[in-house]
Image (spheres, rainbow, N blue to C red):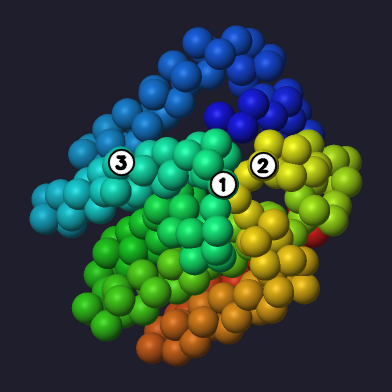
Amino acid sequence: MDDDELRRGMATCHKQFDEATAILAADALQALSFELLTTSDHAIETRIELLRRLAIAAGAQGMVGGQMLDMEAEADGVKSVLEVERIHLHKTGALLRYCCEAGALLAGSTPEQLKACSRYGKAVGLLFQIADDILDATATSDELGKSAGKDRAQNKATYVSQAGLEKARELAEEMRDIALEACEPLGSEGEQLQALAHYIYGRNR
């Protein structure tokens, strides 16, 4: 929807093919995710809960709603970092949080462990977006594998535009620390999640 020409150094689907193909590909992939969940080998109760949470994360209460808020912000502007956070908690953040919750459910987690994974996913979702905003403002297109500086050109609601580069970096550090703390109830099983938080915080593309 940002009409970018590049992703991971390759032409985006709507540029390589056409807009209709890109929309249909997205529709097909989303439908496939529900199909795969219904045909998994896990208990029916687990599958139903995974489907319920995915529908929320992908729909109007999650990614779709967040994308709508993002487009409205392009037209009307935003006035605070909290508005930016609201957009991204619903946008990419909802799907990243779902991934963490799904992993916990599939692993047979306790309620405490599920809550920890959900809190971790929320923090990592925001961390990923803050890091993305910082990179858009500081890296080159070759480094990113996508068009740099596009957020500012499109008047996007970002952490950098609302808080400035240094404050955005402080917020990224704060989200990383929240993610690391969320892993504490998981013990040694949370070490890989902590490593992922460090990676997202320090990524350069």
Q: Looking at the image, is 17 positioned above or below residue 179?
A: above
Q: Position of residue 33 (x, y in %)?
A: 34, 37
First reached walking from the N terminus: tag 3 or tag 1? 3
Question: Could you tell me which residue is drawn at 71 percent across and 74 percent down?
Answer: 167
| Mark 2 / mark 3, whichever is N-terminal | 3
Q: Whole-Å distance between the Cαs marked 2 and 3?
A: 25 Å
The one nearer the camera, 60 or 54, is: 60
- The amino acid type of the residue labelled 2 equals Asn
Which residue is tagged 1?
Answer: 77
Quick check: marks 1 and 2 in contact, CB under 8 Å? yes
Quarter of the figure with residue 99: bottom left
Rendered location of residue 177, percent (x, y): 58, 83
Nearer the observer: mark 2 or 3; the answer is: 2
Q: How many marks?
A: 3
Report the side of 181 relative to 35 (left or right): right
Disc 3 versus disc 1: distance between alpha carbons? 23 Å
Q: Position of residue 93 (x, y in %)?
A: 46, 56
N-term mark: 1 or 2: 1
Residue 202 visible here: no
Q: Nearer the viewer, mark 3 or mark 1?
A: 1
Q: Is residue 104 above or below residue 14?
A: below
Amino acid type, residue under disc 1 in the picture: Gly
The residue at which mark 3 appears reads as 59
- Tell me: residue 87, above or below residue 178: above
Disc 2: which residue: 155
In front here: 41 or 82?
Answer: 82
| Quadrant hosting residue 201 | bottom right
x then y, percent, for residue 174: 60, 81
Helix, strand or loop status at disc 1: loop
Q: CA distance from mark 1 to mark 2?
A: 8 Å
173 lies left or right of 204: left
What is the three-letter code of the residue carrying label 3?
Gly
